[in-house]
Amino acid sequence: MPDLKQELADVAAAIERMDQRAPEPATLPAPGKVRLRHPNTGDIKEVDAVPEAMIPIMGLGYQQVKE
């Protein structure tokens, strides 16, 4: 049982550290660019607002972020 209790304590500590992080300041993308975010990882990419640039990234699961 001590392993399970330690695991729960580690998870609780990780959650607390995540809650204490300051949110990143919101900035607008450059003109002619869009911001795409992966829903699972939270990774954000800023790409040109043309289908040739957006489609390959969106095929990986990224979704456009509304500003």
Image: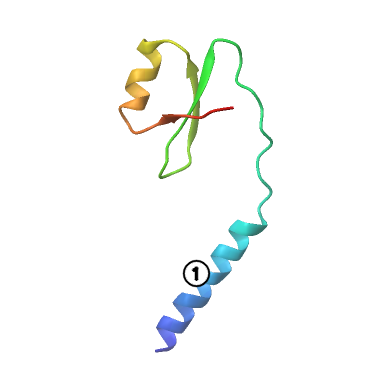
Residue located 51% across and 19% down the image: 34
Can you give x and y, in whole percent of width and height, for residue 47 in the image?
Answer: 48, 19
The answer to whether 53 is drawn above or below residue 25 in the figure is above
Quarter placement of the C terminus: top right
Hey, which residue is sitting farthest left in the picture?
Answer: 59
In what element is the residue under mark 1? helix
Residue located 51% across and 72% down the image: 10
Quarter placement of the N terminus: bottom left
Hey, which residue is sitting farthest bottom in the picture?
Answer: 1
How many numbered discs? 1
Could you classify mark 1 by the number of other residues whose Cα lies within 10 Å: few (under 14), some (14-19), or many (20 or more)? few
Name the foreground residue: 13 vs 55: 55
The answer to whether 38 is drawn above or below residue 46 in the figure is below
Type of colouring? rainbow
Can you give x and y, in whole percent of width and height, for residue 26 in the image?
Answer: 66, 32
From the viewer's perspective, tell me whether residue 13 is left or right of residue 5: right
Report the residue marked by disc 1.
Answer: 11
**Amino acid at dot 1:** Val
| Residue 25, picture quadrant | top right
Residue located 51% across and 30% down the image: 65
Can you give x and y, in whole percent of width and height, for residue 24 in the image?
Answer: 65, 40
From the viewer's perspective, tell me whether residue 10 is left or right of residue 50: right
The answer to whether 45 is drawn above or below residue 47 in the figure is below
Can you give x and y, in whole percent of width and height, for residue 7 in the image?
Answer: 45, 76
Residue located 54% across and 71% down the image: 12
The answer to whether 38 is drawn above or below residue 31 in the figure is below
